[in-house]
Every structure is written in structure tokens, then in C-alpha cells.
Image: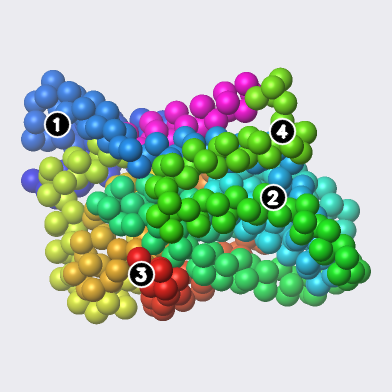
Amino acid sequence: MEVFSIAVLLFSFLLLLSLGTPVAWSIIISSLFTLLVSVPFLPALTTISQRMATGIDSFALLAIPFFILSGELMNKGGVAHRLVAFAKALVGFLPGGLALINVISAMLMGSVAGSAMASASAMGSILGPEMEKEGYSKGFGVAINITSATTGLVIPPSNILIVYSLASGGASIAALFLAGYIPGILTGLFLMAVAMIWAKKKNFKTGKRAPLKTVFSSFVRAFPSLMLLFVVIGGIVSGVFTATEASAIAVIYTLVLGFVYKEITFKTLPTILLKSSTTTAIVMFLIGASMSMSWVLSYENIPEMISSGILSLSDNKIVILLLINFTLLFVGIFMDMTPAVLIFTPIFLPIVTQLGIDPVHFGIIMILNLCIGLCTPPVGSVLFVGVGVANTSIQKVIKPLIPLFLAMIVALLLVTYIPALSLWLPSIFDL
């Protein structure tokens, strides 16, 4: 029965995706078809509906709409320009200076906004035209922009780490936030290395080294934005407030900052709130749909069967992690990150915990892995944002993306097989 259920699930899900059905509806309909294998239609339909509703009935998930709103306030509040200016003062004189600025700005933007799409949109708009003037191809500009934008999903605060905490059954959000710093920065450094090699190969001109006075003044202008990082993460780690309370504080802080910078007014506020509400609705609908599929998988005993199948192939930790990484890389091509985390965490987490792998470490592996999928067609949301902002085609981006993909995969393998990269910081704070 389990084998037939898996066949129904995979066939219906892939068929719906190939027909252009939105991912959330593909998940809901394929989950319903799978449940119909063993349950009559009306109870199956009722169960799917109930599981969608209960799936988003979580206090921890309340942090997501707040962080989405704070990210949108950051994006519209003049923060991106100040972060770019600071990054330019730091690395603008190195080979591939503008590409390095893009990576560092995206990492900084991610650390305060927590949104890969917001980062790709902001950096693409600001740095894209400048990179073209300096001789960078549109394809490479988009490639470096979208890959560096994903670092913001690993560097906290990150909505997807909150989603993983929920899917894992309670992994510490504070520990996950701290665990993301080194892997996120490491990925950024690898992307910067590729950008420098590319720039030297293409003989791109470099800028002049900024005087210390300029570096200091750009840091002072960016400091209020960077302070959000210390307020949010510091408050969570010290136990002053929860992640949900921290997200609400982030909204107040970014709103005040936007008014101080005079980039946000009462006239522009309704547009920001509407966009944030739309994004929140999409994310919550995806979470509800994914939770229903996760329940169906559990009901049909599919995770146990997959777990037994993988462990029957090998009991070697290195081999198992490699198999899981390959699977997630493949899944990321076809599925958005949020449903992938909610559906595959209950499948893979019991396997890795059996092998003695820390759930926090595995969470970072999973998120870092699925970040690569955000840059790949046909469901790469960040890829489409980057291409749309640059007004170019996916075909022109694929070639320069390949070395950047390889850099991300090398970072992923290091994080996978060196647990200390993820667990060292949480261990310092006894998390």
C-alpha cells in the first residue's frame, strides 16, 4: 500500500507541476489523491482542510508575517543604499569590486531583512546598472546577485529557520539562528572567490581604495540598520524575548528607522503593508498546504519506509548524508523551499538523528542545500526575480551560474561534514 501511495503522490504532484499548476495547489491536490487510496472522499477532503488549518495554528509562525513586514520596511526604507555604500568602501578596490560589493551587501541585507527575494530585488536595482557600465555582462551580474541573495536565508534572522524549527518538532530557534552565521559567511566568501577569479580573467577594472575616513563615515550611516541584528539576535539569545516577540520589535525598529531616514511616509505605508500582507498570505498558504502533505505522508507510513530503504543501502554517515544532499538538490529544482522543508524534514530528520547528527546541524545543511534550488529553473523564485529586475533571459544566466553553483556546493559539503561550522557558536551560548 505504501509503495502505491508513493507512486500516486509522485505521479500526481509532478503531473500537476508540469501542467503549470501553482506549487501550493499541486501539494494539496496530490495529498488528497494519496489519502483517497485508503480513505473515502468526504473524510479525506475534510482531513486535508483540517490539517491545513491546524498546520498554521502555531505561535512560532507569528514571527513570519512580522519579519516579512520588517524586511519590506527595510527594503523601502533606504537601508539597501547605505549597506551598499558601506560594502563599496570596504572592498570596492579589489578585483571584481562591484561583484564583491554585491555579495557583501546581500549578506548584510540578509542579516537585517531575512529575505532572499528582497535582497535580489534591491541589489539588482542598485548594482545591476553599475556593473554593466563597468563591463560586467548582464548574465554574470544576475548570477552573482541571486546566489549571494540566498545567504540571507542562512544568516539570521531567517523565516525559513523558524519553519524548520516547527517541522523538526522544536529545534531551538536561537540555536538555529546562531548556527547559520558561519555557514552563511563561508558561502559568501566562496562566491567572492569565484567573482575575483572571474574578474581577473575578464580584466575588469578596479576602483580606488577608500580612505579610512570614508570607510568610517559609511559605517556610521549603515550602523543604525546593522543595529537591528544585535537587537533581534541579542535579545533572543539572551532570553530577553522570544523569536516572535523579536519579530514585532524588528517591525517597530525598522518603521522608526524608515521615518528617520525620510524614505517612508504615511503615504507610502499602505503600499508596504499591502505587499507584506500579500507575501504573508502566499507563505502561510504554502505552509498550510505543506503541513497537510506532511500529515498524509505520516499517515501512510511513507517516512518510515523511505527511512528503512535508505538505511538498508548503507549505515555509513558520510554516504547517507551524501544521498540526502543529492535528494534535496534534486527536490530544490522542482519545489520551493518552504514546502520542501516542511515535507522532507519529517522524512530525513529521524534518519540523521539515528546516526547521531544534531537536528540544528541538519537544519543548516537542509537550508543551505535548498538555497541552491532557489537559483535553478523551473521553480527558482530568486532566479526569476533577478532575471526580471535585470530585464534579461535565463539562458544568458546559466553559464556564469555554473562556477557559482560549484562554490555553493563546496560550501555545502564543508558544512555537511564539519559539524563545528554550525554547532560551535550555539555551543558557546550553551544552546
Q: Which residue is mark 4?
A: 259
- Which mark sits nearer the N-terminus, 4 or 2? 2
Secondary structure under the numbered disc 4 in the rendered image: helix
The crowd level at tag 4 (other Cα within 10 Å; few <14, some 14-19, many 20+) is: some
Q: Which residue is mark 3?
A: 430
Confirm or deny contact between disc 2 and disc 1 (CB under 8 A).
no
C-alpha gap between disc 4 and disc 2: 13 Å
User: Does the image show residue 373?
Assistant: no
- The span shown in magenta is 270-289
Amino acid marked by disc 1: Leu
C-alpha gap between disc 3 and disc 2: 29 Å
Amino acid marked by disc 3: Asp
C-alpha gap between disc 3 and disc 1: 46 Å
For residue 36, the mark is: 1
Q: What residue do we see at 11% from left, 24% from top?
A: 43
Q: Which residue is mark 2?
A: 224
Which mark's residue is nearer the viewer, 3 or 1?
A: 3
Horizontal and vertical percent position of residue 241: 42, 48
Whether 304 is drawn above or below 340: the answer is: below
Whether 42 is drawn above or below 403: the answer is: above
- Which mark sits nearer the N-terminus, 4 or 1? 1
- Which mark sits nearer the N-terminus, 3 or 1? 1
Q: Residue furthest front?
A: 240
Q: What residue do we see at 69% from left, 22% from top?
A: 266
C-alpha gap between disc 2 and disc 1: 54 Å
Please name whichever residue, 82 or 235, is drawn nearer the observer in this view of the structure.
Answer: 235
Amino acid marked by disc 4: Phe
C-alpha gap between disc 4 and disc 3: 38 Å
Q: What residue do we see at 51% from left, 32% from top?
A: 279
- Which mark sits nearer the N-terminus, 3 or 2? 2
